[in-house]
Amino acid sequence: MKAIYKNILRSISEEKKGLAVLIDPDKMPIEKVFGFIEKVNQSIATHIFVGGSTVDDTTTAILVATINTHTKLPVVLFPGDVSQITNHADALLFLSLISGDNPEYLIGKHVRAVSKLRDSNLEVIPTGYLLIENGKQTSVEKVTQTKPLARDNVQEIVDTAIAGELLGMQLIYLEAGSGALQPVPTEIISFVKQALSIPLIVGGGIRTKQQLKNAYDFGADLVVIGTAFEDDEAFFDELKKK
């Protein structure tokens, strides 16, 4: 078991919650990286996730390499495509979109990724990715041409998460989507967490400290926030280390 996943498990055993700041390469100019990462370093963030739905081929590698010069936090790829895989990162969430039925995002792109991963030092973490309805169409839905799971069908969401664990996923990721109108409901987080024996990540639509606390209180082991920091970097002031 490699370091990133092992540390997530250790944090859970010590009842410590994680916070990942998600950086979209398309929305982060290189000249702004230093100032942004300085705020990340001063916050309670435990991880930096990098990825987006549509990113130019070389953008991610350049961004990750730059980020690494300004932080000691682990940098984890959260890729929307094979082109976003770079050895400059510490780990890769090997995402399978198990909430949808598009074979490209269930296994197809993963097969094409193997040639990049064969000689890579990246820690590859199999992750079951569930897109949850949030009130508007997200970029993930558009790019993957899949529909999110209905937020009122809690049993289907729970069963899908369990299926992911039974398939061998090491993480389950409940995602409302970038810029979601509403975060994943706390009821869903709670029921999914109770059903799993693997770590639970929750992201999308979290814009306030109270929403972050709610996600933690109802079972999220690691929360991902991206758009809120893109829209208002002052949000970091509420999440500074004590």
Image: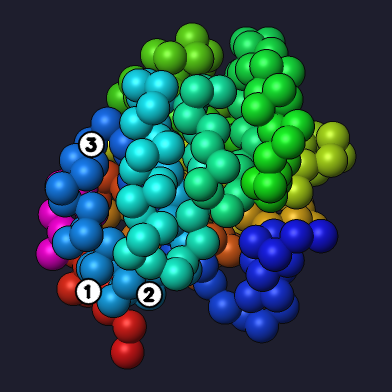
Mark before the other along the chain sequence, 2 or 3: 3
Q: Which residue corresponds to the image point at 40% horizontal and 46% vertical from the top-left? A: 64
Q: Main secondary structure of the magenta part?
A: helix
In this rendering, the label closer to the viewer, 3 or 1: 3
Residue highlighted by disc 3: 27
In this rendering, the label closer to the viewer, 1 or 2: 2
Left or right: 210 as drawn, with respect to 156: left
Residue highlighted by disc 1: 238
Report the number of discs.
3
Judging from the image, what secondary structure is the residue with disc 1 in?
Answer: helix
In this rendering, the label closer to the viewer, 2 or 3: 3
Q: Which residues are magenta?
A: 229-234
Q: Which residue corresponds to the image point at 62% horizontal and 80% vertical from the top-left? A: 15
Amino acid type at image mark 3 = Lys
Q: Which residue corresponds to the image point at 75% horizontal and 32% vertical from the top-left? A: 118
Q: Which mark is residue 198?
A: none
**Relative depth, front residue between 202 and 154:** 202
Judging from the image, what secondary structure is the residue with disc 3 in?
Answer: helix
Dot 2 and dot 3 residues touching (CB under 8 Å) = no
Query: From where the camera sits, is residue 46 visible?
Result: yes
Mark before the other along the chain sequence, 3 or 1: 3
Amino acid type at image mark 2 = Ile
Amino acid type at image mark 1 = Glu
Residue highlighted by disc 2: 44
Query: Does the magenta-highlighted stretch encompass residue 139?
Result: no
In the rendered image, residue 78, in percent from the top left (x then y), is placed at 50, 40
Spatial separation of the CA atoms under disc 3 and disc 1: 22 Å
Spatial separation of the CA atoms under disc 1 and disc 2: 10 Å
